[in-house]
Image (spheres, rainbow, N blue to C red):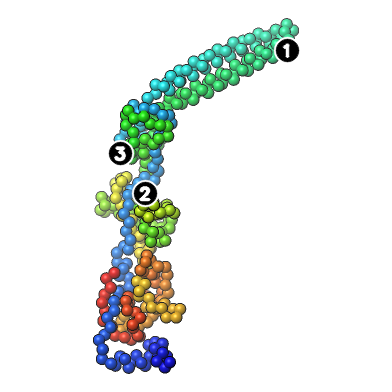
């Protein structure tokens, strides 16, 4: 019991002084300088420049492609024709609807003339009200047929215009998925286009880092093809579901005021900004738990002293944030913390992690 009380007495342990007086080789510990892990970015993510609004354009009618007017990389304006399908069958449908409309209008004109004449006869009491109602009903039916034929003709005319696939906004063609002679269905994407000029960077985050990402977080973005360009970025979208193959989470970084030299498809590097990199991170193995208080061994003049710290979140699998108790530049023990006593003289082997 006496020996146990002397052990827990910490730096005032008289047994410690007795042991220290016995000649022995100095213990070797691993150590690191706090803040050394922050000298360079802790996490860099490779990504690709994409357009913010990427859409797949498709024909509204099925048909055989007869013309392709753009290639991948083409810059287009609103209203430009990108592709065409054969309009022969639809043109015939337009002609048929036009004929039906003409016939309906002719029937309506006849019904309207008859109703006008028989109204005059009715007002002179030369015919009954029932007979007049019969002509009124024929007139109304003819008018309805005209409206129906006109709607069908308008629909057929629209179908004819749909044979031309047009860009609805300025942008850049990213991919063309149909060639002349190919039969395509209605709604089948045949041209992939990035609308507008807004650019973003898509990156994939490993699952052990997703907890440290949040919408609105700031980053620095550099480009392999543009050595002197550095752009501020902001997280806009972080996927809540991992990719089933890579097990990574897709994140979209919006570029703030990017220069004109940035092009779609460029390789980019997304770096955590200074606000994130400024945390003090130490290996979990450096923490020595005494009762409920976490402590670390601080090295000064080849001797160790115990210091209480306030810890934050775990970073990855082997590091933890220190919120209070340490300052950048101080040296701490990272391995062998359970074999030390306050005031021990030690030999240091630098931790290269």
Sequence-wise, the earlier of marks 1 and 2 is 1
Q: Secondary structure at mark 1?
A: helix
Kindly indicate whether the residue at mark 2 contacts the one at mark 1 (C-beta within 8 angstroms).
Answer: no
| CA–CA distance in space, label 1 to label 2 | 75 Å
Q: Position of residue 195 (x, y in %)?
A: 38, 40
| Residue at the (32%, 79%) spot, across then down | 336
Q: Is residue 292 left or right of residue 19?
A: right
Q: Position of residue 208 (x, y in %)?
A: 38, 61
| Residue at the (30%, 52%) spot, across then down | 268
The answer to which quarter of the image holds residue 94 is top left
Sequence-wise, the earlier of marks 1 and 3 is 3
Q: Position of residue 317 (x, y in %)?
A: 37, 66
| Residue at the (35%, 64%) spot, across then down | 277
The residue indicated by pointer 1 is: 129
Q: In what quadrant of the picture does the N terminus appear?
A: bottom left
| Residue at the (40%, 54%) spot, across then down | 242
Residue 62 seen in this snapshot: yes
The residue indicated by pointer 2 is: 200
Sequence-wise, the earlier of marks 2 and 3 is 3
| CA–CA distance in space, label 1 to label 3 | 73 Å
Q: Is residue 114 above or below residue 177?
A: above
Q: Is residue 137 left or right of residue 92?
A: right
Q: Which mark is residue 73?
A: 3
Q: Position of residue 283 (x, y in %)?
A: 34, 71
Q: Secondary structure at mark 3?
A: loop
Q: Nearer the viewer, mark 1 or mark 2?
A: 1
């Amino acid at each position: 019991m006496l020996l146990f009380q002397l052990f827990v007495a910490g730096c005032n342990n008289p047994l410690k002084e007795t042991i220290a007086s016995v000649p022995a080789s100095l213990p070797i510990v691993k150590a690191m300088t706090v803040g050394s892990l922050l000298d360079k970015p802790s996490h860099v993510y490779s990504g690709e420049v994409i357009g913010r609004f990427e859409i797949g354009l498709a024909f509204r009618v099925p048909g055989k492609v007869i013309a392709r007017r753009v290639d991948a990389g083409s810059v287009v304006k609103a209203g430009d024709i990108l592709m065409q399908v054969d309009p022969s069958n639809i043109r015939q449908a337009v002609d048929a609807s036009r004929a039906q409309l003409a016939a309906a209008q002719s029937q309506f004109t006849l019904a309207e003339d008859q109703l006008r004449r028989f109204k005059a006869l009715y007002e002179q009491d030369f015919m009954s009200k029932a007979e007049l109602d019969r002509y009124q009903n024929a007139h109304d039916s003819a008018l309805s047929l005209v409206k129906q034929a006109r709607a069908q003709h308008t629909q057929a005319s629209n179908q004819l215009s749909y044979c031309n696939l047009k860009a609805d906004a300025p942008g850049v063609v990213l991919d063309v998925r149909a060639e002349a002679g190919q039969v395509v269905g209605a709604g089948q994407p045949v041209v992939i286009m990035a609308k507008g000029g807004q650019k973003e960077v898509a990156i994939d985050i490993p699952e052990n880092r997703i907890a440290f990402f949040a919408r609105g977080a700031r980053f620095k973005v550099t480009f392999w093809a543009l050595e002197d360009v550095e752009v501020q970025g902001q997280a806009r979208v972080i996927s809540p579901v991992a990719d089933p193959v890579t097990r990574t989470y897709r994140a979209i970084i919006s570029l703030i005021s990017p220069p004109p030299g940035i092009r779609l498809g460029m390789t980019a590097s997304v770096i955590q900004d200074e606000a994130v990199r400024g945390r003090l991170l130490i290996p979990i193995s450096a923490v020595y738990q005494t009762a409920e208080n976490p402590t670390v061994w601080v090295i000064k003049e080849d001797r160790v002293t115990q210091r209480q710290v306030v810890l934050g979140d775990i970073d990855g699998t082997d590091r933890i944030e220190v919120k209070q108790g340490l300052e950048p530049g101080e040296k701490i023990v990272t391995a062998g913390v359970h074999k030390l006593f306050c005031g021990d003289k030690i030999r240091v082997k630098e931790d290269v992690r």
